Amino acid sequence: MSERISREELVKIYNIEITFFDELVDVGLLNVETENEIRYLPYEDLPVFEKFTNLHYDLEINLPGLEVINHMLQKMEDLKKKNRDLMNKLSVISDRYEDI
């Protein structure tokens, strides 16, 4: 079983509303595990949770805004990966022409 923290503990530690946590789960921004009707967030997903919590409470970004930001960040990561792949391919092609 992976290490995880319950929703109730997160609400106490981060001093957030339980409805905010549930809304993040409902729109698919957080993935939780449920056991005996208790929702748990895997420790590996804590940075994502903290990012959304900070954006919401510190910058007052609403849930639709968080969804847009998340979508844009995912697109940026995809573009970075494609760019790395293209740079690697270019490097291989460049190395081949140097040998000629």
Image: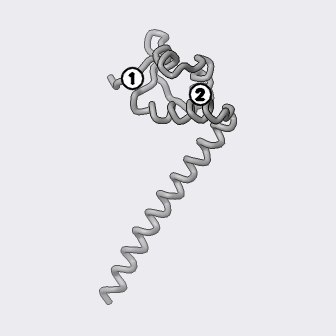
How far from the left and from the top, in percent, is residue 36? Answer: 45, 9
At x 30%, y 86%, the residue is 99
From this view, report whether residue 96 is shown above or below residue 44. below
**Mark closest to the chain's N terminus, 2 or 1:** 1
At x 39%, y 28%, the residue is 43
How far from the left and from the top, in percent, is residue 59? Answer: 64, 36
Q: What residue type is labelled 1?
A: Arg
Q: What residue type is labelled 2?
A: Leu
Q: Is mark 1 on a helix, strand or loop?
A: strand
Colour mapping: one colour
At x 44%, y 69%, the residue is 87
User: For the residue carrying disc 1, how many other residues have a C-alpha within 10 Å: few (<14), some (14-19), or many (20+)?
Assistant: some
How far from the left and from the top, in percent, is residue 95? Answer: 34, 79
Q: In the rendered view, does 56 fall on the left or right side of 100? A: right
From this view, report whether residue 22 is shown above or below residue 57. above
Q: Name the residue under label 1.
A: 4
The CA distance from mark 2 to mark 1 is 17 Å
